[in-house]
Image (tube, rainbow, N blue to C red):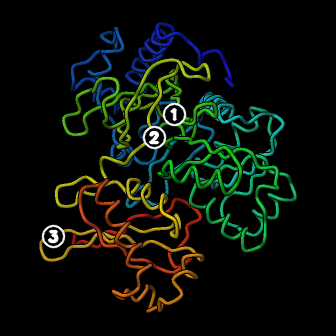
Amino acid sequence: MVWNKEETNSRSEMQALQLGRLQATVNYLYEKNPYYRNKLDELKVSPREIRSLDDIRRLPFTTKQDIRDNYPFRLFSAPQEEIVEYHATSGTTGKPVVVGYTRQDLETWKEVMARALTGAGVTKHDVVQNIYGYGLFTGGIGIHYGAIRVGAAVIPISGGNTQRQLMLMEDFGSSVLTSTPSFLMHLHEAGEEMGIDFHKLKLRVGVLGAEPWSEAMRHKIQDKFGIKACDIYGLSEIIGPGVAFECVEKQHGLHINEDYFYPEIIDPHSCEVLAEGEVGELVFTTVANQGQPLLRFRTRDITRLTYGTCVCGRTTVVMERVSGRSDDMLIIRGVNVFPSQIESIILKREGVSPHYMVIVERKGAMDSLRVKVEVTEEFMVKAAADILKGDEFDILEDVAAVRSKKRNLQQDIKDVIGISVDIQLVPPNSIARSEGKAKRIEDRRPK
């Protein structure tokens, strides 16, 4: 299901649209924004010299630190009186990243979110239970805008409130859930304890994102809730959610709204642009924003791009599910490790839950990984001979079930990431739950 015809443009039509908008954006920034004017002057690039899409390589990169350094409003390009809404990132050190929206920017946001929700199969007949947080975080209000645009009813419940979430899910007949995958799994755990059969509810679609999640996690969610779960991608700096989204027809790869957000893939070290299909860091230039347009914003997300026509009919470029980040990936003994790789293994194993924590430690001169993994209640029953000691099992050599589980997990993870890890099996509900983005890494190495 496609929201509008621009999503099915031919490649030549899309490129013509992108070039016109890119040229207008560069001119706009040069005229309105002293920061970018100085950057372009330093590079000796005139807006008149942007004659093709390839000329984007001559433009400067923008980083999250650049936005923080210009806190709060010095990267805004629209006059202050035209800014009608503010958002900001949370959970970071130092100054937050602030984003300002004009009325036209909000229309753009509603448009791309309508595309994203339509892609997931949401229609005017749905009831959307919006579990993403409202406030300065862009997730909740972005979903809200899009749901209203497509004509759906919205329950703006935000995060937390586990018991109320479940009650409204039953009583209001929610058909669409929008949430982080980890909190949705938490809701399922709580619902099971209350005896809720999720397959008897009206649920049919999940629009999930705001944190990395694996294909194995998708299958678990779909199985437990009886829904189709689609990924959604966004960044506050670019606009919020709605930058890219999965279609329900394919559920593999995310369609980028590239007529608004021009994508590139670069080598994160050399900053050279990579060819189609090569893995690298995702970069966006906003070619329609007014409040705070950004040139070549480095997302730090690692992915690849492919072009073609999808089974859903869209011709927009597709980004592979983000595999990690160029700035927070773990480098252990010379090996690049992403938590999503470990998650994909954990979720394939019976007897363990999707709740885990990757702990990085230094033993002598060597870095090491320890993975805490919760076991299920069923495993606890089967391994009844195990004695709980503190917050973990007393791993005795003659406890076959525990020893086998650890050994299998260790081997599977080593096969994927190339290094050995320690496995710590812990009882159910012993790893802290998050109502926002799940914390998956605890780095205990000396700074």
> In terms of sequence position, does the residue under pointer 1 or pointer 2 come before the other?
1
Mark 3, residue position = 366
Residue 39 on image: x %, y %: 27, 29
Q: CA distance from mark 1 to mark 2?
A: 7 Å
User: Given the image, on which type of amino acid does mark 1 rest?
Assistant: Leu
Q: Is residue 444 above or below residue 74?
A: below
- Contact check, label 1 and label 2, Cβ < 8 Å: yes
Mark 1, residue position = 254
Density class for disc 1 (Cα within 10 Å; few <14, some 14-19, many ≥20) is: many
Residue 92 on image: x %, y %: 42, 59
The quadrant in which residue 187 appears is bottom right
Secondary element at image label 1? strand
Q: Foreground residue, 211 or 199?
A: 199
Residue 234 on image: x %, y %: 51, 41
User: Given the image, on which type of amino acid does mark 2 rest?
Assistant: Arg
Q: Residue at x 86, y 54 (%)?
A: 172
User: Given the image, on which type of amino acid does mark 3 rest?
Assistant: Met
Density class for disc 2 (Cα within 10 Å; few <14, some 14-19, many ≥20) is: many
The C terminus sits in image quarter: bottom left
Q: Foreground residue, 48 or 31?
A: 48
Q: CA distance from mark 3 to mark 2?
A: 31 Å
Q: Is residue 111 above or below residue 356?
A: above
Q: Residue furthest left?
A: 365
Residue 113 on image: x %, y %: 64, 34
The quadrant in which residue 296 appears is top left
Q: CA distance from mark 3 to mark 1?
A: 38 Å
Q: Residue at x 55, y 77 (%)?
A: 428
Mark 2, residue position = 321
Would residue 95 be found to the left or right of residue 131 on screen? Answer: left
Q: Residue at x 33, y 86 (%)?
A: 397
